[in-house]
Amino acid sequence: MKLSGKVAIVTGSTAGIGKGIALMFAKEGAALCIVGRNAERGEKTVKEIEAAGGEAFFIKADVGSSEDMRMIVDKTVEKFGKLDIMVNNAAVIHNAGLLDLKEDDWDMIIRNNLRSVFLGSKYAAAQMVKQGKGGRIINISSIHARISEPQAAPYTAAKGGIEAFTRTIATELAPHRITANILAPGATYTELTVPMYTPAVKEALYKRIPLKAIANPEDIACGALFMASDESWYMTGARICIDGGYEMDGSLPDAKYWTE
C-alpha cells in the first residue's frame, strides 16, 4: 500500500499503459480520477477498481482543452479533497511521412500529446502548491523521444518536447517539494499496438531488444508506482526508461564483431 491515502489523476487511463498505471495505483491504495474520451471503457475501468476494493470515478474530457483540464483537477479535489499525483499519459499517434503529413494532423498530435502535458502539469501543480504538501508529476514519454520512428514525426516531436518541458518544471517546482519526472516506455502490448505487432514485427523486435520480450502495461506501471511513491522523494527531472534495453543497445542483430 505504497500510495495509501493518496489521490491521483491519470489521463488516458481507460486502456493501455494508462489503465495499467491506474489499476496499480488503486491496488496500492490511491483514490483515482480516470480520464479519457470513451465513457464505456472509462466506467469499466472504474468498476474494475471498485471490484478490487479501490475508489475511482471517471471524467470524459479533452485533455488538450484548458477548460477540461482545469475541470479535471477541480472535480478531483471536490470529490477527494486534494491532489497528490498527476500522471500525464494520454497520447495518440498518426502515421504519415513528412511530405504527406497534413498541418491539421501535426496540430492535432501536438495538442493531444504535448499541450495536454503542459495543461495537466500547470493545473495540478497550482493545486499542489496551494496545498503546501508537495506532490508528484509523472509525464509519460517514449523511447522515441530519443530514437527515430519513421512516419511519426509529430509523435516523436511531442515526446521530445515532454522530456525538455519536464526537466524545466522540475527545477521550477522543486522549492515546493513537487517532483516532476519522465517515464519512457519501449515496446508494450496495448490495444493500440497489438494490431501493429505482426509476426514479422515481433521477430524484428526480439532481435533488437536485448531482453527479447515486449512489455505489458503493468511492467511500465511499476516505474510509475516508484515515481509516485514516497521512495522517489529525492528524484526530480529524471528519466526512467523501461524498454528491455532497446534504446541503449547499439549492437547489430545477428552480427559478430569478432571471429574465433
Image (spheres, rainbow, N blue to C red):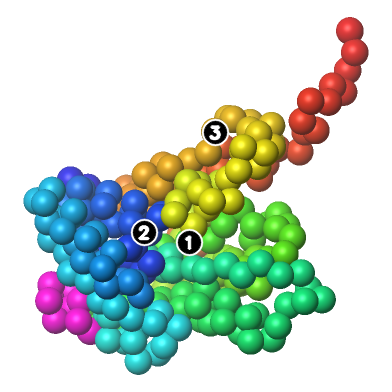
Looking at the rendered image, the quarter that the N terminus falls into is top left
Left or right relative to 183: residue 206: right
Q: Residue at x 34, y 87 (%)?
A: 68
Disc number at residue 213? 3
Residue 100 lies, with reference to residue 138, above or below; the image says below
Kindly identify which residue carries mark 2.
15
**Whole-percent x, y for residue 255 in the image:** 83, 26
Residue 83 is one of the magenta-drawn residues: yes
Which segment is the magenta one?
Answer: 74-84
| Residue 4 percent across, percent down from the top left | 15, 53
SS state under label 2: loop
User: Sequence-wise, which precedes: disc 3 or disc 2?
Assistant: 2
The residue shown at (22%, 61%) is 44
Question: Which mark, by number, is residue 140?
Answer: 1
Q: Is residue 77 magenta?
A: yes
Amino acid residing under circle 2: Ala
Observer able to see residue 237: yes
Image point (49%, 68%), residue name = 91
Mark 2 surroundings within 10 Å by alpha-carbon count, few (fewer than 14), some (14 through 19), many (20 or more)? many
